[in-house]
Image (cartoon, coloured by chain):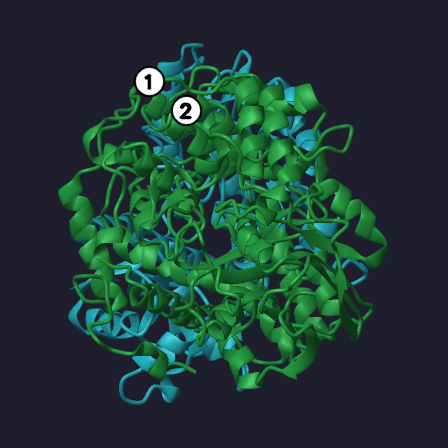
Amino acid sequence: MGWTGKLLHVDLTRGTCERREIPAEILHAYLGGRGLGVRLMRDFFRLDPFDPDMPIIFAVGPLCGTNSPTAARLACVSRSPLTGTIYDCSAGGRFAWRLKAAGLDAVFITGQSARPALLAIDGARAELLPAGALWGKGVKETVASLKERGSVTAIGPAGENGVLFANIMMGEGNSIGRGGLGAVMGRKRLKAITVQGEGTTPVADRERFDAARADVMRLFRASPVIFGELGISEYGTPALVDLMAQRRMAPTENFRATFFADSGNYSGPAIKRECGAKKEGCYGCPIQCKKASAQGEALPEYETVNHFGALNGISDLHAIVRANSLCNELGMDTISAAATLSAFGEARGRFPDPAEVASLLADIACRRGEGELLGLGSRRLAEQLGHSEVSMSVKSLELPAYDPRGAYGMALAYATSNRGGCHLRAYPISHEILRKPVPTDRFSFSGKARIIKIAEDVNAAVDSLVACKFAFFGATLEEYGELLTAATGVEYGPESLKAIGERIYLTERFYNCENGFSRKDDTLPERFFTEPGSGGEGIDVPPVDRERFSEELQKYYRIRGLDENGGFGGRNILEELP
Amino acid sequence: MRDQISKYTGKLLADRSACADGIAFAAQDDVLITAGAPGLAELAGNTLSRLNSLALVAARPSLPFADFLIARAAEGEDCIVPQDTETRTFLHDIPFLRRKDLTGDPSPVLAKLLGNRKGVIVEGVGIVAVGAITVEQAFINYSSVFHSTFVKYLQDVLADGFRLPGEREAFQAFRSQWLRPLSAAGLDFVPSLPGDKEAILDEIERVGRYTVERGLVDSFFGNISAAAGELIYISQTAASLDELKGCIDPVPADNSSTTGITASSELLAHRKIYEQTGARVILHGHPKFAVVMSMLCDRKKECNIKDCWKDCPHVRDLGGTPVVAGEIGAGGLAKRVPPVIGASGSAIVYGHGVFTLGREGFGEAFATMVDVENFCREEYFRRVDGKVL
């Protein structure tokens, strides 16, 4: 129950597709999604991200296929060419649900095709087909030409051309973003995957499942962040624009400032008013936080509006929407694209205007002109320009739209994240800003080492269920543990799920350490320790206290059982794990 | 974290939910610390060290109701399921450990139970509650378990009478000694709330504090607001009403800004109440007797509705205050309270709490809440006295 126990092994070099069993004990110990993908990387994590033998894994979770709220998701796992770390990204849409309906928990793709290829999955059948005619096409056209084959996930020109922050785009507009897994797929010459299936996911205990689902929905309705009249269901994540401005922590002009006076132009209410935003979302999700224009065009998320807005000094909402659409069409991560442009702007002394943004995005995707360098991401770009200080990244991953000077848990979490400067690993914005499940003092490091460690474990489990992080603005692992138990017939609870999350997190950390990552990488760009943010309205935004930061990092290592260099002290943790 | 432990120990004493000599906390960052009553502190530390959480409180409640609920539970039962909103929404059920099953160190089994639920009752020991990420959270969960067991025990006594030796005497002691007269006497209110921001914030902070001090709300529940022109000043979600400084959101009436995304989950209810009544201020608390009485319904035997708390369409009456159903937030309360609250200036939500209005200031809203709770308290004891228990 819950799992199909099947994996589709695809070898692009040999042109084979083969269904294999996944041992039940591995599924029980790693759940699915991120956890399963990370476990399946055990024999491959040392490979170069572009090595033909480097796998790229799409894995759903045990709740996918049931009507668990927000669970029609998958994780895509490989090693990031941008960061060099183990990498996973959670994505929604319909693809995950159809993959499960095709009887699969995961697709494991290895090798490199001699020619552009399409992986087509239809129920029990899977085949590799030529995709030469699609190579070079944008995401929209690719998806449209394959829609008869079911749900589509595809790369755009950015992935084909090896842009280090290229996305894999889901046909419904969602993306597998940030770490450049689109470039991994592109190097394998795999243009797209299509899937359809008719299978259903049985539930072990329907009565218990329905009760748990009712509990989850009650908590969603009680959460102002989810279903409140100013929440993300109503306005999408741009609901955060006004809040981040008020809290003085909206990254502006490459993080030189933390307040952008014109941010109201792209706030949630402004987007609703100007673009006629309507609700959309992942399959079966009650929250429907995605927003689309009246013409059906996907509208940008909070991070995107801030980074194409404040971070580049642009206040024109329609220019930001165009930049978002362009990234989606070319298959690029909006955060890294905008942050790399911003670093470029600071280095040359002029941020790009809206017209230049559009032309540079096209150049990046095609790796032409300045786009060749920009396509490497901000860290490599800054180093090559002789201004390494302008890359606002951690482990080469560009920071999203929460300035760490405004939330110290966020500062620590950026540093400890196993995939680089990501807000979603521990998601302390939830308690430091949104007051869920309880508020914490955003300008204090007190207790944050333990809090971040716990949240990283929780979110590793959430990414393996696979559920959406937004669900946890209301619900907790108590309710999702009940859903999982009812769906699978295997008893899980918050503590056992956190233990699974810890197992996943330590595995990722171990992979990274084996690949040379250590304490030296667990830090923030120098700017945050030396320059203040934009205080105002009674809020002071001083630089992060380096000493306290280091002290808290060492606490974090001790809590994690790591040595003072953030490593395992010669211990091979993989030998201790299932 | 020691300052947090000290703070929340003080809160448990101030709200009289725990015995002064029976409070202990444990908290862990990179090291585990414990504080408080030695035996309980050891239990707290041993239990927390087995959990992937930050804090834990173990305390002996000031009332024996939780132990009575365990003793009254049928053999084979291992949890109690109170019907109030706080429990249903956040706790789901409350597991318990019986005294006879406690052999040796109970911390392993306690940790196992707390691995699935926020709070556990250990017969003869007390309430043990965990805080996943803060000490405050442990306090909140303790407070919710105390609230839930209080409400359920009073309901059960009214329904089934006393069943155990010593229950009657303990109940009498509770009635005559633990309970204190409830009034608004000695409290100062601004008679007519001015329009300027600072004065409004000051008054909201002060009245929030009064609401906690007079026992009209527990832990971080309840909310409070004032309307001023095009703005609603409302307490933030997860804000304790006695600590509202910096925790009040100004929310534009036209939703032109979303800074109020951190506002109370009842923002919509407040907004609609203002629209439909013209009130100036709103106070929402969880006074216990009102919660108990709101769940008593004469029609339960012949009624087909199972989920009364959300599905009951009827407007019942408690001493002139309408009682309606409706879940928190977007769940229906915001539809059912606004149409009925205007006439009496108060409304009770089934199993949840009380909303009251002030046309000029908080004095009226506070006094009305006191009146509602006093009516419910008197009515409860009238019914208890009317039964042969």
Q: For this rendering, which residue is in front, B348 or A156? A: A156
Residue appearing at x 36%, y 68% in the figure: A511
Vertical placement of residue B191 versus A135, above or below: above
- Quarter assignment of residue B335: top right
Which color was chain B given?
Answer: cyan
Q: Horizontal and vertical percent for residue B116?
A: 46, 70
Vertical placement of residue A116 versus B329, above or below: below
Give the class, few, some or many, for how many residues have Cα within 10 Å of label 1's Cα (few <14, many ≥20).
Answer: few
Helix, strand or loop at mark 2: helix
Q: Is residue A368 left or right of residue A378?
A: right
Q: Which residue is mark 1?
A: A537
Residue appearing at x 33%, y 25% in the figure: A347
Q: Chain of mark 2?
A: A
User: What amino acid is at disc 1?
Assistant: Glu
Q: For this rendering, which residue is in front, A532 or A470? A: A532
* Residue B123 visible, this orientation: no
Q: Horizontal and vertical percent for residue A513?
A: 29, 65
Dots 1, 2 in contact, CB < 8 A: yes
Q: For this rendering, which residue is in front, A363 or B285? A: A363
Which color was chain A given?
Answer: green
Q: CA distance from mark 1 to mark 2?
A: 8 Å
Q: Which residue is mark 2?
A: A246
